[in-house]
Amino acid sequence: MLTRRTLFGVGGAVLLAPGATATTAIAKSIPLCFPRPTGPFHVGTTELHLVDASRADPWVAGRTRELMVSVWYPAARTSEPAAYLPPRTAQRYGEDAAIALQQPVGRVDWIGARTHAGLLAPVRRGRYPVVIFSPGFGVPRGLASVQTAELASRGYVVVTVDHTYEVAAVEFPGGRLEVQTLPHDGYALTARATRVADVRFVLEQLTRLAQGHNPDAEQRRLPEGLGRILDLRHIGAFGHSAGGITAADVMDVDRRVGAGIDLDGTLAYGYPDPASSPTVKHGTDRPFLLFGTGGTGPNGGPQSHLTEPSWRMFWDNSTGWRRDLNLPNGRHYSFIDYQTLIPWFQRFFPVPPDLVANTIGSADPDAVLRALRAYVPAFFDQHLRQRPQDGVWRRALPETTFVE
């Protein structure tokens, strides 16, 4: 499901009360804390400013399409920790978050937050499968840093994409901020097509990077050897919400992507009849994982191939390896960093109960994190590296069900 901008992007969670404002008395600032990746490798990261000179931007007349992406990769050693969000993005996001959390602006230190990835850390030698991540509608790419760092620590190059003018704010070099710019309605199919074109363009730029070119528009320094570690023979895609739709849409038109995951994205979005969606109608002949929750399907129930019409049709029309998992007690944002951040905030101040219920639900946070760290890497290990994961698919972990 896609909506216009809310604090946490896509889905049914109504987190900003009409007329709500953040309180102004500033208490001691709370640092953000993220779980360390569990893989054997250090993690490095860098960003790229990519300009598609062949494509006009669909949202702003007279503009050429441009994107910001982050590349997360196995590193040889650590370096200075990278910022969680770019500074102006963090400032803007923190102001909105203060309203939802009912805390003063500055109570949470979004600007000072750091990841477990080293900025421009030296690359680790080798060749690693490439996985593209597309975020939910309105959600910054950085809000999936926990899962992104986890995959990189397991030996993947993960490329996260901000879809410009959909996201609440995208920060470009020099501090230029481009904010969400959409018509009031009728944008769904344009958004889907634009996202597919964005991801395919990113894949083209990664090919240039692998050939020894620097695709960054400003030619900023990249980690030495970054292009040489890209194994573009083995590419996966995954995403949350609208990003999960994007993963499936890209696979429908681009054979380069060999495996995909949809984290709680309704595949019929924008189509009055699910069967009229080409992605749904075609299914896929390549491995695909559907991963839903207990509260985002029809009538507030579970989203699975047994309950959601577009998932059911996609499932029935697919001939490749497939699985359907569900977090019955989770909610739409259990798949991104809110699953970690909201329990962290609860240590310091009361988080509004409606915010918790509508965002991450009542699932045990540690169990959800364990499940995501098990199933997402296992899926890509099996289908991009050809490493069987029979033990992982044999039984459901706590807070997770297998939908048969």
Image: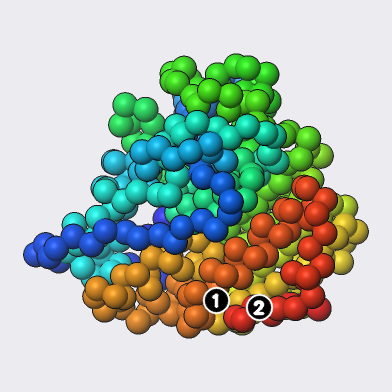
Say which residue appears at 35% left-offset and 70% top-offset.
344
Residue 56 in sight from this viewpoint: no
Amino acid found under the numbered disc labelled 1: Ala
Q: Is residue 123 visible?
A: yes
Secondary structure under the numbered disc 2 in the rendered image: loop
Number of the label disc, if any, that sits on residue 367: 1
From the image, which quarter does the C terminus lie in? bottom right
> Residue at the left extreme?
25
Residue 375 in the image, given as x and y percentages of width and height: 67, 65
Tell me if residue 71 comes above or below residue 331 in the rendering.
Answer: above
Q: In this view, does 182 lie above or below 331?
A: above
Q: Residue at x 36, y 38 (%)?
A: 80
Q: Where is residue 181 in the image (x, y as percent from the top left)?
A: 42, 42
Provide the secondary structure element on which disc 1 rests.
Answer: helix
Q: In which quarter of the image is residue 391?
A: bottom right
User: As displayed, is residue 206 above or below residue 21?
Assistant: above
**Residue 115, above or below 327:** above
Image quadrant occupied by the N terminus: bottom right
Mark 2–mark 1 Cα distance, whole angstroms, equals 8 Å
Question: Going by the image, does 77 lie left or right of 153?
Answer: left
Q: Residue 397 carries which label?
A: 2
* Residue 198 figure quarter: top right
Q: Looking at the image, which is closer to me, 320 or 317?
A: 320
Left or right: 208 in relation to 28: right
Q: Alpha-carbon neighbours of circle 1 within 10 Å: few (<14), some, or many (≥20)?
A: some
At label 2, counting other C-alpha atoms closer than 10 Å, the crowd grade (few under 14, some 14-19, many 20 or more) is some
Query: Amino acid type of disc 2?
Result: Leu
Question: Residue, x 73% and y 33% (percent of image)?
Answer: 232
Whether residues under marks 2 and 1 lie with C-beta atoms below 8 angstroms apart, the answer is: yes
